[in-house]
Amino acid sequence: MSGVVYLVGAGPGAPDLLTLRAARLLAQADVVFHDALLHPETLALAEQAVKVAVGKRSGKLSAAQRFITKQLVDAARKHKTIVRLKGGDPMLFGRAQEEIDALNAAGVKVEIVPGISAAFAASAELQTSLTRRALSRSVLFATPREAEGSRKNDWARAAAAADTVALYMAAGEAFVVRDALLAQGVPASRPAVIVENAASAQVRVMVASVGTLPGVADSVGDGPALVLVGEVYADLAAAQNAAREFFFLQRTELA
Ligand code: SAH
C-alpha cells in the first residue's frame, strides 16, 4: 500500500473556517496526525480515522519532528489517506518543508491543502486591513523565535522596513521584539496590537505600541497570540468596533 499524505491547513480555530477540501479529506482519512489546540469539532470530521496528537505548542525539538516525519512515512505504507493537520496554513511556520522533503525522499506522495493563517483571522477580528491605500502596501510575516543556526534578530530589519508586520510566536518574547524593533529605528510610538485566540469566542484584543508591548503582552493568557505592528493600527476606533465580549482596550502612550 502506498498512501497519500495530505498536509492540511486547519485554519485558525473555528471549525467552519476550514476549506471544503480539508473537510472532505478529513472525512476520508484513515489516520489523522494533528497539532495540539485543534478544535474538537474539526477533529470530529475525521469520523473513521485513528487520531494521533503530535503537535507541541512550542519549543519543537528536531528529534520530535523526525519522529513525526517517520510516523507519516510509516502510515503511508499502511493506509490510503493520511491527513497531517496543522493550525492555520501549513506553509507558514509549520515545519512543512521538513515533512514534504522527508516524504518525497521516502517516495511518498504529498499534497498540500491551504488554510487560513492567523494573520488573516486576526485582521478579521480587528476589522483592520493589513494593507491600506497610501498607508500600507507591504506585509511581513515573521517570527522572533530563533531556530538553531538562525542569526539573532535578523527578522527585525525586514520588520522595520515593512508597512505592516505580523509576528507569529512573539507574544512571549515581547521584550525581545520591542528591543529589536527599537534597535532598528522603529519609533516606540508605532502602533501594535496583540490578538489572542483569533477566530474563537475567546478572542481578546490588546492595543499597544512598540514601546508598551512588553507590559501589554503580560496580560496575554494561554491562547495562541499574534502580534501585529503598523500604522494601520493607529485607528484604535476601528479595533474597538470589532469589540466582542472579551474585548478590552489597554490605554497606551501612543505618543
Ligand atoms: N501555520 C500557522 C502558524 C503556526 S505558528 C498559521 O498559519 O497560522 C503558531 C503561532 O501562530 C502562534 O504562536 C500564534 O502567533 C499564531 N496563531 C495561531 N493561531 C492563532 C489564533 N487563533 N489567534 C492568534 N494567533 C494565532
Image (cartoon, grey):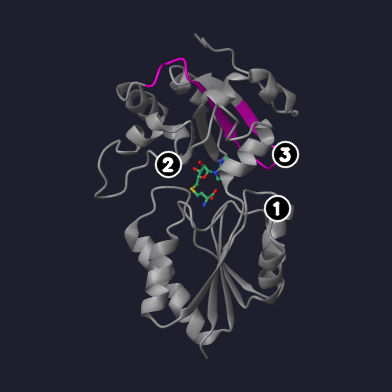
Q: Which residue is mark 3?
A: 201
Cα distance between the residues tagged 3 and 2: 26 Å
Amino acid type assigned to the residue bearing label 3 in the image: Ala
- Residue 29 included in the magenta stretch of the image: no
Looking at the image, residue 13 sits to the left or right of residue 95; the answer is: right
Earlier in the chain: of badge 3 and badge 1, it is 1
| Quadrant in the rendering for residue 184 | top left
Q: Which residues are magenta?
A: 186-205
Q: Which residue is mark 1?
A: 17
Amino acid type assigned to the residue bearing label 2 in the image: Ala
Is the magenta region chiefly helix, strand or loop? loop
For the residues labelled 1 and 2, say whether their Cβ atoms are less than 8 Å apart. Answer: no
| Quadrant in the rendering for residue 112 | bottom right
Cα distance between the residues tagged 3 and 1: 13 Å
Amino acid type assigned to the residue bearing label 1 in the image: Leu
Asked if residue 218 shows in the view, the reply is no
